[in-house]
Image (cartoon, rainbow, N blue to C red):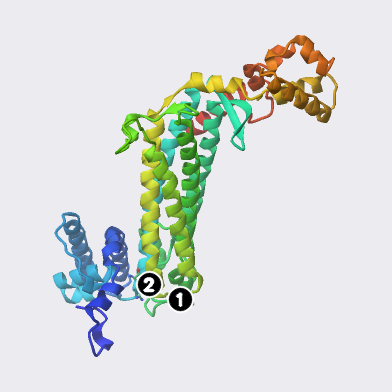
C-alpha cells in the first residue's frame, strides 16, 4: 500500500512503480535508515510531539525490524518504493497507529540526506583502515629495500638512479594525502540534515541539536533548503575516491610494466595472477589491470553525479535518487581495489639484481658527471654540453661513461681527474644527493624514521 496514495484518484502502473522504485539498491541503507528513525522518534518523544510510550514502542519495534532484516526475515516490496517507505510500512503493519506517527516533522528528503551521510561516514572509516594497511605495507617494503637500486625514470626513459625504497615512499606520500583528503571530506559530511523537513523546515518544536548529538554529528546544517538539495559532500567523496583510484592505477601501471619480461623487475605472486585460455605460457597481471580499469569506472561515478546535479532547481528533485548507485559503486570499487592491491604488493617478488643491473646502463650518471665538472669551477651549462658530447661519443663506441679511459675523459675536459670514477658509480650518484627529500640512502632512512615517528604519535 502506498503511503502517499490519498491525493490520487488512480493507482500507478506496475511499470511506473518499477521505474520509480529505488528499493533494489537503497535497501543497503536499512541500518542507517533505522538509526536515523530511532533518533527521530526519541526526539519526538522528548519534545512531546508524540508520547513517550509511542516513542518507546516505535524504537523497540524498529530494533526488532533491524534484527529481522539482518536475519533475512524481511521482504521489501517495489510498491513501497524505497527503503524509507518499506521500513515505515513494516513498522505500521506491526504497531498500527503509533507507527504512522514516526514521520511527523520529517520528510524523506531530509531522511535520505541523513542516510547517505551516515553511510559515507561508515565507508570512509573502512577506506581509511584499508589505506592505513597499505601505508604500513609501503613503509615496511621501503625499509627492506633501502639498498635496492633501480633506474628512476622521466618520460619512461632512464633518468637518474634511485632506490626502490625512495620510489615506494613517493607512493606512501600520495596515499597519505588520500587519507587526509578523506578525513577532510568527513568534516563536511558530518553535519546534520535531519529536521529540515521537505525544504522549508517544520512547524513542530523539534530539537535538531539533540538529533546531532544523538547521531554523533559535529553540527546542524544551518539552512534546511541546502540540507535537502545539495550533494556536494557526496561529490567530494567521489572525487577523493577518484584521486585514490588514480594513484592506485599509476602504481598498477608500473607493476604491469615491471612484471613484463622486458623489465623483469618484479614477479606478481601466482595467487594474484591469471593464465590464458589459449597460450599455456602466459601469466597475466589481471588484478593490476583491473584496478587500472576500475579507476575509469570510479571517474565515471563522479561524472555521473556531477551531471545529475548540475541543472537541478532547488530544492529536492527525484533526479537525486540517482546519487546512490554511483556512490555505492565507487565505495565498493575503492574498498575492493585497496584490499587486493595491498595483498598483491605484500606477496610480489622483487628482483633486486635485475633492478640494479638496469640502473648501470642508460647514462643515468650523466648529471653527476656534469656536477663533477661544476665542482671544478665550470659553469653548469658548459658542463651539460661537454657531458652531452661525451655521452654521444660513449654511445657511438658502445661504452658506459665509467668505461671510458682517463685519456678519453681528458679529451673532453682537462678538469677530469682520477676521482671521476668514484664520483659516477651508481651508489655515489645516489648518496651524493644532498637536498631534503632526496633519494640518498641517508635521506630515505630519515624519511622512514619520520613516518615511523608520526605513526607512533
Ligand atoms: N528514494 C528517494 C531518494 O533516494 C527518497 C527521497 C524521496 N523524496 C521525494 N520527495 N520523492 O532520493
Q: Position of residue 318 (x, y in %)?
A: 38, 74
Instruction: State the mark number for residue 425.
Output: none
**Which image quarter is the N terminus in?**
bottom left
Q: Is residue 310 above or below residue 388?
A: below
Q: Under tag 2, what secondary structure?
A: helix
Instruction: List x then y, in percent, for residue 296.
Output: 45, 52
From this viewpoint, is residue 180 visible? Answer: yes
Give how far across and how far down residue 239 sits, in percent.
49, 54
Residue at image point 22% right, 84% down: 11
Residue 244 is left or right of residue 26, and the answer is: right
Q: Is residue 53 above or below residue 256?
A: below
Which label is found at residue 315? Answer: 1
Question: Can residue 146 be seen?
Answer: no
The residue lying toward the viewer, choosing from 283 and 277, is 277
Q: Is residue 320 left or right of residue 78?
A: right
Image quarter of residue 441? top right
Question: Mark number for residue 109?
Answer: 2
Residue 278, picture quadrant? top left
- State the residue in front, 388 or 367: 388
Mark 2 C-beta to ligand 1 under 8 Å: yes
Most distant residue in the bottom direction: 9
Q: Are marks 1 and 2 in contact (CB under 8 Å)?
A: yes
Amino acid at each position: 500500500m502506498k503511503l502517499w496514495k490519498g491525493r490520487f484518484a488512480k493507482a500507478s502502473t506496475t511499470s511506473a512503480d518499477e521505474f520509480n522504485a529505488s528499493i533494489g539498491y537503497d535497501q543497503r541503507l536499512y541500518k542507517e535508515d533505522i538509526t536515523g528513525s530511532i533518533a527521530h522518534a526519541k526526539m519526538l518523544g522528548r519534545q512531546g510531539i508524540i508520547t513517550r510510550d509511542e516513542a518507546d514502542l516505535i524504537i523497540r519495534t524498529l530494533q526488532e525490524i533491524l534484527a529481522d532484516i539482518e536475519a533475512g526475515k524481511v521482504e521489501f516490496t517495489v510498491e513501497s518504493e524505497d527503503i524509507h517507505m518499506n521500513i515505515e510500512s513494516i513498522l505500521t503493519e506491526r504497531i498500527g497507529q503509533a507507527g504512522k506517527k514516526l514521520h511527523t516533522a520529517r520528510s524523506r528528503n531530509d531522511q535520505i540526506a541523513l542516510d547517505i551521510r551516515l553511510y559515507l561516514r561508515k565507508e570512509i572509516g573502512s577506506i581509511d583502515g584499508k589505506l592505513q594497511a597499505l601505508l604500513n605495507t609501503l613503509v615496511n617494503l621501503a625499509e627492506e629495500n633501502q639498498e635496492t637500486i633501480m633506474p628512476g625514470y622521466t618520460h619512461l626513459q632512464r633518468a637518474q638512479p634511485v632506490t626502490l625504497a625512495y620510489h615506494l615512499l613517493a607512493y606512501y606520500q600520495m596515499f597519505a594525502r588520500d587519507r587526509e583528503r578523506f578525513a577532510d571530506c568527513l568534516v563536511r559530511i558530518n553535519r546534520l540534515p535531519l529536521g529540515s523537513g521537505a525544504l522549508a523546515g517544520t512547524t513542530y518544536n523539534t530539537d535538531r541539536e539533540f538529533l546531532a548529538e544523538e547521531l554523533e554529528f559535529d553540527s546542524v546544517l544551518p539552512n534546511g533548503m541546502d540540507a535537502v538539495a545539495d550533494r556536494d559532500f557526496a561529490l567530494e567523496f567521489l572525487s577523493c575516491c577518484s584521486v585514490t583510484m588514480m594513484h592506485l592505477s599509476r602504481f598498477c601501471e608500473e607493476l604491469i610494466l615491471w612484471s613484463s619480461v622486458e623489465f623483469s623487475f618484479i614477479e606478481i605472486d601466482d595467487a594474484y595472477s591469471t593464465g590464458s585460455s589459449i597460450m599455456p605460457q602466459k601469466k597475466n597481471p589481471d588484478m593490476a589491470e583491473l584496478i587500472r580499469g576500475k579507476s575509469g569506472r570510479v571517474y565515471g561515478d563522479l561524472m555521473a553525479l556531477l551531471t545529475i546535479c548540475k541543472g537541478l532547481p532547488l530544492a529536492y528533485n527525484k533526479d537525486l535518487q540517482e546519487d546512490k548507485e554511483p556512490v555505492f559503486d565507487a565505495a565498493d570499487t575503492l574498498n575492493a581495489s585497496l584490499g587486493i592491491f595491498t595483498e598483491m604488493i605484500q606477496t610480489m617478488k622483487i628482483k633486486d639484481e635485475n633492478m640494479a643491473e638496469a640502473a648501470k646502463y642508460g647514462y643515468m650518471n650523466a648529471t653527476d658527471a656534469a656536477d663533477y665538472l661544476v665542482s671544478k669551477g665550470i659553469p653548469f651549462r658548459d658542463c651539460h654540453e661537454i657531458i652531452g658530447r661525451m655521452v654521444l661519443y660513449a654511445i657511438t663506441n658502445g661504452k658506459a661513461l665509467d668505461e671510458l679511459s682517463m685519456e678519453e675523459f681528458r679529451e673532453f675536459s682537462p678538469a677530469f681527474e682520477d676521482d671521476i670514477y668514484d664520483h659516477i658509480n651508481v651508489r655515489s650518484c645516489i648518496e651524493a644527493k644532498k637536498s631534503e627529500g632526496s633519494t640518498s640512502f641517508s635521506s630515505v632512512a630519515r624519511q622512514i624514521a619520520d613516518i615511523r615517528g608520526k605513526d607512533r604519535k
